[in-house]
Image (cartoon, rainbow, N blue to C red):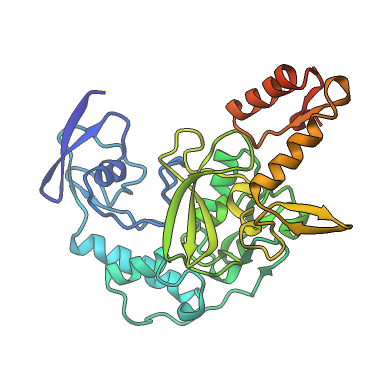
Amino acid sequence: METFSLTIDGIPVAAQHGQTILEAARTAGIYIPNLCADPDLAPYGACRLCVVEVDGARGLPTACSTPATPGMVVRTDTPNVNMVRRGVVELLISDHPEDCLTCPRNQHCELQKIAAYVGVREQRFRKLHRPPIVDDSNPFFRRDLSKCILCGKCVRACAEILNVGAVNFINRGYRTYIGTLGERPLVESNCESCGLCVEVCPTGALASKNGKAPSREVNTICGYCAVGCGIKLGVRGQELVGSTGDPENEVNHGNLCVKGRYGYGFVNHADRLTSPLIKKDGDFVKASWDEALDLIAENFGKHRGDAFGVLSSARCTNEENYLIQKFARGVMGTNNVDHCARL
């Protein structure tokens, strides 16, 4: 695609037609503070933290919604820009709980990061408090609206990416908050518990109930169905503590369903089978794989033809499903092959 050049903070930056100033800056590795912008969402311009100075432009336009143009000269770190950003952050903090050390998003909170970046070190405005609205109904994540900054990212992600629209803005002015249709708990709404809202939330308003931070991440493929979504499993010691989508994966582009994001608890469950079991004298006892497979082969041999049937699984790969039906027809001599996706 054809590119053009603009200047950001004195640095020549190559941009593509259709990119915003914020997108061009991100491509060049230049940080512009923002809370409501997301690469997967349409420009919104709600938080006003990405304001910049542009030669020839009136006022301070928002970088997330202003198209980059050839020859544009942009400055992201000037006294006027920083004054506006500090004012916005101070207003947000005046309406925000002071529980950073116990907040599950501590050190991963974008508001906390931006407050440090713009140099907010003290509280200038009178502290205000939103009435506590906590929704603990969802089994996977908790919603605490006292920490919500009304950036709208959860609303937009649910509507623009998922086309579900489980949450939206309710009321006006200071009484505005994010809620469900009829102000019902999340578990009673049309929320699909995919956790995308938790992923995009820049503060602790939405946070996983797990609460453990991983020590490392492992890239793999989700095993719940045959779609093949890329996931990053958070590992701490020998325990899985989280799962997020892999944005580099071309199948899901970082998005996950509820199973992919939260369905990992079985891995470390105390009841999970870790070896084959064979029933002896009425009780299941541990056995080796060779012993179990020999027993299966012996019993399969007694039920060839139409006495035998195969039920395959969507959690198998296409290649594995092919082998299963080939085994049924070529080895067991039956066409009784079915698949769980039809049930």
Observer able to see residue 17: yes
**Residue drawn 41% across and 61% down?**
216
**Residue drawn 79% across and 32% down?**
300
Residue sitting nearer the eye, 107 or 328: 328
The answer to whether residue 315 is above or below residue 195 is above
Residue 250 falls in image quadrant: top left
Residue 280 x %, y %: 83, 55
Residue sitting nearer the eye, 76 or 154: 154
Residue 336 x %, y %: 82, 21
Q: Which quarter of the rendering shows the N terminus?
A: top left
Residue sitting nearer the eye, 209 or 103: 209
Residue 167 x %, y %: 65, 51
Observer able to see residue 98: no
**Residue drawn 56% across and 53% down?**
197
Residue 271 falls in image quadrant: bottom right
Q: Is 143 on the left or on the right of 298, as rendered?
A: left
**Residue drawn 28% across and 28% down?**
17
The answer to whether residue 75 is above or below residue 340 is below
Residue sitting nearer the eye, 60 or 185: 185
Q: Which quarter of the rendering shows the C terminus?
A: top right
Residue 191 x %, y %: 69, 50
